[in-house]
Amino acid sequence: MKAIILAAGKGTRMGSLTHDLPKPMLMVKGKPILEWIIRGLYQEAKVEHFCIVVGYKAEKILEYFKDGQFLGIKIDYRFQKKQDGTGKALLVAKDLISNEPFFLSYGDILLGDCREYGRMVHAYKGDGLVGLTDGNDLSKGGAVFIGSDGQIIDIIEKPQDPALSKGAFYNAGIYLISPKIFDFMENLCLSPRGEYELTDALRMFSRHGKLYGFLIAGSCVDVRDPQTLGSLNS
């Protein structure tokens, strides 16, 4: 099994902490955020081939991880030269994915219990799983609506009206998904924010395929700002 990790962004909300480092390289308990993700996927889901999509301060990631040999894995790199959104970032790694499902994760999402990666492998069905959490502020991420059978019926990005997200789950930013997702990425239009959004591709996929929600047990932390980073290191 393979995994693609999106690590091209700067992480502007981190302020001066990312002047010299990309956010996925910030330290949590002695290791970069990105290393925790890679180790968890390798140990619990048996992922041995990774592709890291890099951009801002890419040399810091390449210098640290190199080819991945010190972790017992293989790492390829792909560069997102134009920072035009997560919906296009994945396409630069399309050539590394064949016809098998693959993990996709943002480079700043930490699981409290990495065994959840393995549980996703065993729970896989349809065209893929979207990792979900409960109790998060839906206005800061994707609100995912699922039917009684667990199938995703809609996704709304950062809804500001609480009435629009009633009963929804929070998109955790971790996926185990079919390569069919690339078809929807290639046909994306710019969002109102002027970017190509992964959420839009997932929404289209959910309407033409069968995506299911996977509720992640334990903590799932989006390391979005210095306060969150500080709490993880306290």
Image: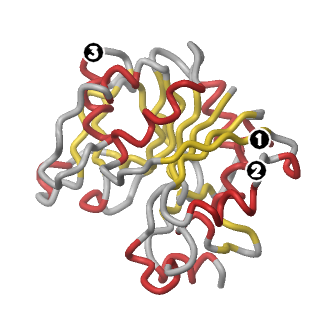
> Of marks 3 and 1, which one's residue comes earlier in the chain?
1
Q: Is residue 13 left or right of residue 157?
A: right
Q: Is residue 117 left or right of residue 141?
A: right
Residue at image location 54% in from the left, 31% down from the top: 176
In the rendered image, the vertical position of residue 59 relative to residue 200, given as above or below: below
Q: Please tell me which residue lies in front, 95 or 111.
A: 95
Disc 2 and disc 1 in contact, CB within 8 angstroms: yes
Q: Amino acid at mark 1?
A: Tyr
Which residue position holds label 1? 42
Residue at image location 81% in from the left, 40% down from the top: 73
> Of marks 3 and 2, which one's residue comes earlier in the chain?
2
- Where's the N terminus, which quadrant? top right
Which residue position holds label 3? 208
- Where's the C terminus, which quadrant? bottom right
Q: Secondary structure at mark 2?
A: helix
Distance between the alpha carbons at the discs numbered 2 and 1? 5 Å
Q: Please tell me which residue lies in front, 14 or 57.
A: 57
Which residue position holds label 2? 39
Q: Amino acid at mark 2?
A: Arg
Q: Amino acid at mark 3?
A: His
| Residue 211, x across and y down, in percent | 39, 23
Q: Is residue 65 left or right of residue 33?
A: right
| Residue 44, x across and y down, in percent | 76, 40
Residue at image location 30% in from the left, 50% down from the top: 84
Distance between the alpha carbons at the discs numbered 3 and 2? 33 Å
